[in-house]
Amino acid sequence: MNTPILLTAFGTTATALATYSHLDKKIRSHFPEKEILWSYSSKMVSEPQKGSAYLKPEEALRQLADRGVGKIVVQSLHLLPGTEFHDLQRTVRNSEIACTTGMPLLTTPDDYNEVGEILRPTIAARPDKAILLLGHGTTHPIWTAYTCLETILRRKYGERLFVGVLEKFPDSKALPAEIKAAGFAEVCIIPLLLIAGMHYRRDIVGNGPASWMTRLRENGLAVEAINHGLGLFPGVDALLIRHISEALEVSSRRC
């Protein structure tokens, strides 16, 4: 039986659905013989998604089991193997179907380096600016990945590269002052998020006193913000397709 692919994302507001649509087209084009399905793990997913065959991962897997599907690849569209990914793994383990999970975007050292190269044109086009990648942040032990990513990217681009988070860990409160103290007058924010949804609009470019745009400007910095998430950078689709291909290879060896 042809192994279906279940793409599992956290979910988003309607304005950022274009990223999922873009990735969907790229993945379907690469795997034209595969059935491609979607599920969303967020408890607060947007109404437009709910109106268009919105399913949670456990619901999608249950429906596939009812159809007699014996095995499937479940591809995570999470950025890191953190809390949401481990919740997905628990769901997969409880499924009646033999599931093989495709890993999140940033899992292996090769993934980190590949994302660094994907960002090269954007970073190289701004030689005099500090570059600030802003991710979500977490209390999961994977929080150390942000520091790891900063180390890898600084080897490529030097000390003008900074990685911070919107909440939780690693603590990023001092970053605006650190960027200013390093002698920069301008900074470019790259959202370290798959999609530029609510967190982008509220926590990165929002007008509130806690937004990064406000905090950086209060430190005398001129701020540019890339207006889309990683999912729309050329090459990210290929990275995800590689993860799906690796999972399909593992799945093909299962009885």
Image: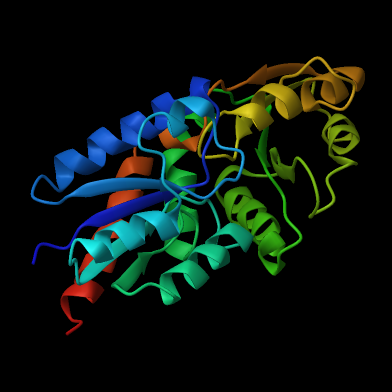
Q: Position of residue 131 (x, y in %)?
A: 66, 33
167, above or below 128, in the image: below
Residue 19, quarter of the rendered image = top left
> Is the image coloured rainbow, by chain, by secondary structure, or in one colour?
rainbow
Q: Position of residue 208 (x, y in %)?
A: 85, 19
Residue 70 in view in this figure: yes
226, above or below 110, in the image: above
Residue at 52%, 27% (x, y): give it.
Answer: 47
Residue at 60%, 45% (x, y): give it.
Answer: 43
Quarter in which the C terminus is drawn: bottom left
Residue at 19%, 66% (x, y): give it.
Answer: 69
Q: Nearer the viewer, residue 57 or 149?
A: 57
Q: Quick check: 173 left or right of 83?
A: right
Q: Quick check: 248 left or right of 76?
A: left
Q: Quick check: 19 left or right of 124?
A: left
Residue at 56%, 65% (x, y): give it.
Answer: 87
Q: Nearer the viewer, residue 214 or 251?
A: 251
23, above or below 90, in the image: above
